Image (cartoon, rainbow, N blue to C red):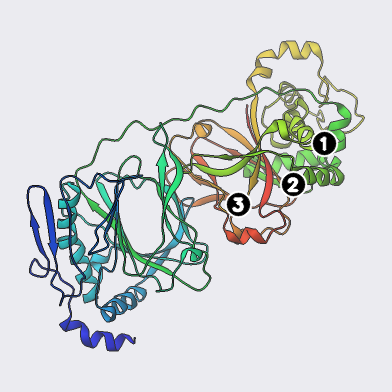
């Protein structure tokens, strides 16, 4: 249908925007919504008010309206607008609006720059009036929520690989969230973009996706916003279709939120020992010389970040990659979904090459090497060497101890004198597998970001990684969306980043493009070091 043809019929087939178009009757225990059949909307339908249907699922036979209690109150209203020409005109007017990219840790899609109330299109204005009057009044009856006059309405386009990850929508005053779908008639589950609803655990954290609502053209979906109303828009998989929708919130009196759940802090460990030959067999010798370490440290002190290419000796790196892709490794999914979603290796299941690499990263030799590369005081001998003018403190195979500054050996007297400093430096580490659907999110209750720290990531199995797949680590200033730094996965690369308390990080959602990679993603060993 061409837009011109639709506009010819539009003036005489207006959306119902006044009480005369919809007839609403509220009684003590029921509410009836009646819409004359000659109007463009499709009902009457009848459902209970004051008390939402107590059944887990309730479908009104005549209207096919679906109301559900679990995992939280939600409703699906099919065929909201009867006039197909009007529907096509509304869709065309929406596509003609100005959209802006929205892209951060939580989402990637296009959204109208302003609320639809500022649109000049008469059909969009009328649809918004429908939301603000008839639909809002009906929602007040059917939910019992005292909604006010504030209604947000935006238009969004989700294209290939776009998504909105798990969140609860609960900002002050938002009481009911809604989505009106204007997708193609043949949109199906395989196109992606479904609305996923989560159950919650005993801490009111998202647990499992228990409901998936596939977009259907002309369907209106709404749900009650609450501390446990966790949901997401699944990744759009279609390369040719656009998930067009009008979405927003009906506002009312804010509800009291429970105290935010604070996850227990992850344990930290002091460094251990590692054999000399293991250390020198694994680390690329180019990074052990004093001249190289000096230039790296100078750059790091200026930039607070660096990536060291070919960090491991090639045969050791190859053995590490083979071991990580072994079927013997046991992986567990890390949650909750409003904070993270990736697989972490059970260390007891790791083959020897991975176990050795972990011991290396947790060793006193590594703490001292990192001190020499960054200028941080992660080892008691690093402080002594940095205070001695003219003393070279690089680490080379076969090098004799100079003032006790050998990477792999420590002088007992020096160790005893520096016991406090030795105990102060700590690290935590994990082995991770990133695949389509993996991500981490910035969250207010992150205890890891409360201190200055050195982040280390050793990337494995990501040759020729494309940033379009996601998987990169972004650093942002607290309260800001603008990126300070982006670290892209590179084969056998050691990424080092020093961050302060006001710097947050996240790993961008890996989309379906990562399926093209040999490992369906990549592996890494991540560690955080504290002085």
- The quarter in which the N terminus is drawn is bottom left
Q: Percent from the top left, x then y, of residue 253?
A: 19, 43
Circles 1, 3 touching at the beta carbon (< 8 Å): no
**Could you tell which of marks 2 and 3 lies nearer the N-terminus?**
2
The disc at residue 290 is 1
Q: Residues within 10 Å of mark 3 (few under 14, many from 20)?
A: many
| Distance Cα–Cα, label 2 vs label 3 | 20 Å
Res 475 visible: yes
- Residue at mark 2: 325
* Numbered disc 1: secondary structure: helix
| Distance Cα–Cα, label 1 vs label 3 | 31 Å
* Numbered disc 3: secondary structure: loop
- Residue at mark 3: 472
Which is more toward the observer, 304 or 445? 445
The disc at residue 68 is none
Which is more toward the observer, 403 or 125? 125
Q: Percent from the top left, x then y, of residue 531?
A: 63, 26
Which is more toward the observer, 286 or 387? 286
**Could you tell which of marks 2 and 1 lies nearer the N-terminus?**
1
Q: Percent from the top left, x then y, of residue 371?
A: 71, 31
* Up-down relation of residue 489 to residue 513 (above or below): above
Residue at left 46%, top 67%? Answer: 188
Residue at left 52%, top 51%? Answer: 483
* Up-down relation of residue 118 to residue 296 (above or below): below
Mark closer to the observer (1, 3): 3
């Amino acid at each position: 249908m061409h837009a011109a043809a639709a506009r010819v019929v539009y003036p005489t087939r207006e959306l119902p925007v006044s009480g005369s178009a919809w007839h609403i009757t509220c009684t003590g225990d029921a509410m009836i919504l009646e819409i004359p059949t000659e109007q463009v909307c499709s009902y009457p339908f009848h459902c209970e008010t004051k008390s939402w249907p107590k059944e887990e699922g309730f479908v009104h036979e005549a209207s096919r309206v679906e109301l559900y209690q679990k995992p939280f109150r939600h409703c699906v209203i099919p065929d909201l607008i009867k006039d197909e020409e009007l529907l096509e005109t509304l869709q065309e007017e929406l596509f003609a609006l100005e959209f802006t990219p929205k892209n951060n840790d939580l989402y990637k899609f296009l959204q109208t720059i302003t609320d639809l109330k500022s649109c000049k299109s008469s059909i969009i204005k009328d649809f918004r009036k429908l939301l603000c009057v008839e639909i809002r009044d009906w929602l007040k009856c059917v939910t019992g929520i005292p909604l006010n006059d504030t209604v947000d309405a935006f238009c969004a386009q989700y294209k290939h690989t776009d998504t909105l990850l798990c969140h609860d929508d609960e900002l002050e005053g938002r009481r009911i969230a809604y989505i009106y779908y204007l997708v193609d008639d043949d949109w199906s589950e395989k196109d992606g973009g479904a609305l996923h609803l989560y159950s919650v655990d005993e801490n009111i954290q998202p647990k499992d996706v228990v409901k998936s609502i596939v977009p259907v053209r002309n369907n209106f979906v709404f749900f009650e916003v609450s501390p446990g109303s966790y949901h997401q828009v699944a990744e759009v998989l279609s390369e040719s279709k656009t998930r067009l929708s009008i979405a927003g919130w009906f506002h009312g009196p804010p509800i009291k939120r429970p105290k935010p759940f604070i996850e227990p802090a992850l344990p930290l460990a002091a460094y251990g020992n590692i054999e000399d030959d293991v250390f020198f067999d694994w680390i690329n010798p180019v990074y052990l010389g004093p001249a190289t370490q000096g230039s790296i440290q100078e750059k790091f002190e200026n930039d607070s970040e660096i990536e060291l290419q070919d960090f491991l000796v090639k045969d050791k790196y190859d053995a590490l990659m083979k071991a990580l892709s072994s079927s013997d490794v046991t992986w567990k999914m890390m949650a909750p979904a409003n904070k993270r979603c990736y697989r972490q290796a059970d260390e007891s299941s790791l083959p020897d090459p991975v176990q050795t690499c972990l011991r290396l990263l947790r060793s006193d030799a590594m703490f001292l090497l990192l001190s020499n590369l960054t200028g941080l005081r992660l080892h008691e001998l690093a402080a002594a060497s940095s205070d001695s003018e003219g003393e070279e403190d690089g680490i080379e195979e076969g090098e004799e101890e100079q003032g006790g500054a050998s990477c792999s050996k420590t002088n007992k007297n020096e160790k005893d004198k520096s016991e406090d400093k030795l105990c102060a430096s700590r690290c935590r580490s994990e082995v991770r597998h990133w695949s389509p659907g993996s991500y981490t999110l910035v969250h207010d209750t992150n205890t890891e970001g409360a201190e200055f720290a050195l982040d280390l990531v050793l990337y494995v199995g990501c040759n020729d990684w494309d940033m379009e797949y996601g998987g990169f680590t972004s650093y942002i200033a607290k309260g800001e969306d603008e990126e300070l730094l982006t670290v892209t996965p590179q084969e056998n690369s050691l990424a080092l980043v020093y961050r302060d308390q006001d710097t947050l990080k996240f790993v961008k959602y890996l989309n379906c493009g990562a399926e093209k990679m040999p490992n369906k993603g990549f592996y890494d060993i991540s560690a955080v070091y504290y002085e």
